[in-house]
Amino acid sequence: MARSKATPDYVLFATTIALLVIGLVMVYSASEAWATYRFDDSFFFAKRQLFFSSVGVVAMLFMMKVDYWTWRTWAKLILIVCFLLLVIVLIPGVGLVRGGARSWLGVGAFSIQPSEFMKMAMIVFLAKFLSENQKKIVSFKKGLLPSLSLVLLAFGMIMLQPDLGTGAVMVGTCVIMIFVSGARLSHFLWLGLLGVAGFVALIASAPYRIQRITSFLDPWSDPLGSGFQIIQSLYAIGPGGLMGMGLGESRQKYFYLPEPQTDFIFAILAEELGFIGGAIVLCLFGILLWRGIRIALGAPDLFGSFLAVGIISMVAIQVMINIGVVTGLMPVTGITLPLLSYGGSSLTLMLVSLGVLLNISRHIRV
């Protein structure tokens, strides 16, 4: 009979901390100029990142101790609360508008992003649903349709903000979970065609999304407008070469690349630490993915397995989208790089999610 181990996956834990430390260093390096100019404090963003990292690590350690089955019990309530938050954030005068999207709740600089919470809530609820209805998932009407309908409802509410990037990550994560649970490939092919049509309609419905697509295909057609971020990102990565220009020696962070400490932090990292530095970070994310898959395969029950699949899929999708945007392989979406980019809700929720994954690792069959 298989037995469970009591200790968490220390490789996963160490990899998470390593990425977090690299993120702290790079947030300071990337934001130094902006922080000095806007707040007269070169450590402004770094200090806030340290605060959110500390809160996140404490939360991760706490979640590592909480039995992951607890989330199965509270899955429905957590999802309902997150849906309510998505409704509240849309109320004019309540939800805060940043970057053209009404995506935030809070006061002043301290705020939360409900869509980030929804990603984890949907993962938890879907893991519960799929573990209890795995035999029905092969049926379009009894298994696939109910689960996808709930995901699309959440996606629609997130798009009302609008926040296409976060919505895409959530949908992609849920689709992977449903596929892994045993859904029929033929169903996915038909739904994939509908999804592509819907995605095209979403892009066509907003002029700025069309501009992002055209700038992705040819950023130099509008170098001072829609193509500006991609071009400046490539100007950062190119000079980095093999070894980089040296930590703190980036030129693009001096008001060329907008908000370099958030979505485009990997570009600054590549500029300062070169191909080697970028490769090390990608290898660390590769280790994170490997350990997550290992935990999912070794989980003692279907709920733990689907929960692990959801968490590690969310991380992997965000990494792929962010790196794709920074390197000019994908349109700009506003997705942060997990554990490295500056952020409050996104960083804290990511560490909470990894804490849940670490708890599952304490129960894997050995």
Image: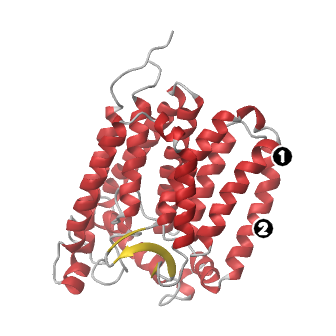
Q: How is the image coloured?
A: secondary structure
The C terminus - image quarter: top left
User: Identity of the amino acid at label 2?
Assistant: Ala
The picture quadrant where one finds residue 250 is bottom left
Mark 1: secondary structure:
helix
Q: Is residue 219 above or below residue 272?
A: below
Relative side of 170 to 256, left or right: right
**What residue does disc 2 label?**
197
The picture quadrant where one finds residue 161 is bottom right
* Residue 209 coordinates in the image, percent (x, y): 62, 79
Near mark 2 (Cα within 10 A), the count class, few <14, some 14-19 or many ≥20, is few
Foreground mark, 2 or 1, reads 1
Relative side of 152 to 100, left or right: right
User: Identity of the amino acid at label 1?
Assistant: Lys
Near mark 1 (Cα within 10 A), the count class, few <14, some 14-19 or many ≥20, is few
* Residue 193 coordinates in the image, percent (x, y): 80, 59
Look at 43% across and 72% down and name the residue there.
Answer: 105
**What residue does disc 1 label?**
141
Counting the numbered discs, the total is: 2
Mark 2: secondary structure:
helix
| Rendered image: mark on residue 242 | none
